[in-house]
Image (spheres, rainbow, N blue to C red):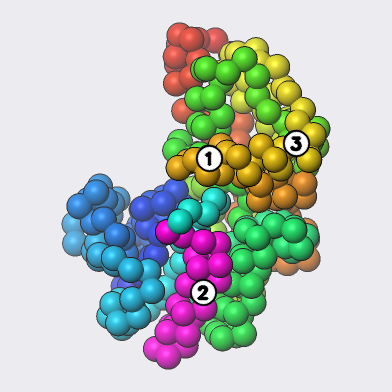
Amino acid sequence: MQKNLGKVACIFGCSGFLGSNLIRPLTLKGWRIIAVTRFPYKNNRLKMYGPVGDVDLEKLNNLFDEEEIRKFLKASDVVINCVGILNESKQNSFEAIHTRFPAMLSKLCAEYDKSLIHISSLGIEASSATSRYAKSKLEGEKIILETLKNKSIILRSGLMVGTSDKFFNTLSSLCQISPFLPLIGQGLNYIQPIVVTDAAKAIVEVLEKEEINNIYELGGPNTFTFKELMEILLKQIKKKRFLLPIPIPFAKVLGRILQVMPKPLLTADNVELMQFDAIVSNKYSTLKDLKISPKAISEVLPSYMWRFRKGGQFAKL
């Protein structure tokens, strides 16, 4: 991809964790943004992430409305897909969001000769045999690469960490009411978290590079077991909680029960995913190839985890 000369980036999933952290660094590089969202009136804050007039909010009621999407693509130079879900609902399935939407988007990008940057996840090759989440992600990647060939880039990201992340914030909130934290199995699966601003920086760098590869794996400088991340969390919020191992068979049953809730803490598919590592495989390009030195999560956790400590930001660690 060529360097930006006042070009336009169309972002799907702009109000999500990564998408909202991507707008500012892109506009600092001179990009104008078409931010596609279902609820522009709820996301007016996104306009403040760039210079006046550089962030244009566009409403899209139906993710599969090809005619509306065509309008956005015609006005863009590159398309960035940050759309993704961790849990299914009656409205959104893994197959629809992770496979059918990327397939449609890549088809339209090919039609208008646009490049596509697609955000995926670490570890999906290993877990795709049993996890519907991973299978749908991997199938979406394959369709994109077949459709766009040299005009597509897949960025497989590790667990994203930052001020409004779901992982540390949700589990820290759970600590306020629960005497224990659950470990699926023994919590020995490995995770390679990445600070969300480093993931956003990777997208910017990919856009700046003239010679790129098709797949990049984005992980931070350290790997942790799930159990170790729980221990880090408890240290950050200065609480003692029992880490309760839950046998896999029972965890699957529990997941099936909980997944009927509107915002489940656990689903059966989550359990399938958590039996595999989500780390950089070293089979593909990495942050090193983009000349990015990622931050350790220990550098950012204190900036927002203090909210869950007694005494807040003035409490000593």
Judged by depth in the image, the label closer to the viewer, 2 or 3, is: 3
Mark 3: secondary structure: helix
**Residue visible at 64% across and 77% down?**
142
Mark 2: secondary structure: helix
Mark 1 residue crowding within 10 angstroms, few (<14) / some (14–19) / many (20+): some
Residue that numbered label 3 is attached to: 250
Q: Residue 19: x and y, percent?
A: 42, 55
Magenta segment boundaries in residue numbering: 91-114
Residue that numbered label 2 is attached to: 100
**Residue visible at 46% across and 60% down?**
92
Image quadrant of residue 252?
A: top right
Of the residues under marks 1 and 2, which one precedes in the sequence? Answer: 2
Residue that numbered label 1 is attached to: 264
> Rounded to the nearest whole Å, what is the CA distance between mark 1 and mark 3?
16 Å
Mark 3 residue crowding within 10 angstroms, few (<14) / some (14–19) / many (20+): few
Please say whether residue 227 is one of the residues in the magenta stretch: no
- What secondary structure do most residues of the magenta stretch adopt? helix
Up-down relation of residue 111 to residue 293 (above or below)? below
Residue 288 is at least partly visible in this image: no
Of the residues under marks 1 and 3, which one precedes in the sequence? Answer: 3
Instruction: Report whether 145 appears left or right of 247.
Output: left
Q: Residue 285: x and y, percent?
A: 70, 66
Image quadrant of residue 91?
A: bottom left
Q: Nearer the viewer, residue 36 or 253?
A: 253
